[in-house]
Amino acid sequence: MSATEKTTPSIWPMFLVGLVMFALFLGVSAWLRSASTGSLEDVERGEVRVQNLAELQKTNEEQLNTYGWVDKEKGTVRIPIDRAMELAIVSLNQTQPAPAYPIDPNAATGAADPAGLPAAAEAPTDPGATVPEALSPENAAPEPAPAPSM
């Protein structure tokens, strides 16, 4: 072999070291898991927690799916959630959508008061005053069609 030729190191020693390290890691983690077994008190507390959770889930399921009194003196009752959703849908389908706050007719034009707040739409207080063109019934938007009932 000449001085210019280089030998490539074998990969097997690195592979064996990696394999030994991995086996060592698995052994230590298994030993730590076995050493951390809970005491009898911890096991009993865990069983009590499981029972409490089962009772809570049973109570919640009963309250969601049965009729009952919440407060008999006030006349507050509980109904099944499926029935409550059906009633809510019927109620919502019977009402027309309405804005949550007064609609400002000047908002579309971008007009605002000097303080930077949008001008509020007010009805004229003088019976002889004319209605602004934006508020007149001729310029009002058409009524929305009723929502289809389910």
Image (cartoon, rainbow, N blue to C red):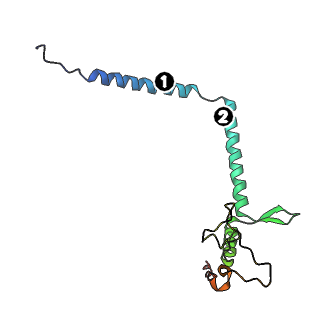
When asked about the image quadrant of residue 131, the answer is bottom right
- Residue 146 at x, y = what percent? 63, 81
Residue at the spot x=73%, y=64% of the render?
A: 66
- Residue 108 at x, y = what percent? 60, 71
- Residue 4 at x, y = what percent? 13, 16
Residue 37 shows which numbered tag? none
Return the residue nearer the eye: 17 or 4.
Answer: 4
Q: Is residue 53 above or below residue 106?
A: above
State the residue position of label 1. 28
Tell me the element at label 2. helix
- Residue 148 at x, y = what percent? 60, 80
Front position among marks 1 and 2: 1
Question: Looking at the picture, which amino acid does disc 2 mark?
Answer: Val
- Residue that lies at the very extreme toward the right in this rendered image: 73
State the residue position of label 2. 43
When asked about the image quadrant of residue 22, the answer is top left
Q: Is residue 81 above or below residue 105?
A: above
Q: Is residue 68 above or below residue 34?
A: below
Q: Quick one: label 1 or label 2, which is nearer the N terminus?
A: 1
Residue at the spot x=66%, y=61% of the render?
A: 116
Tell me the element at label 1. helix
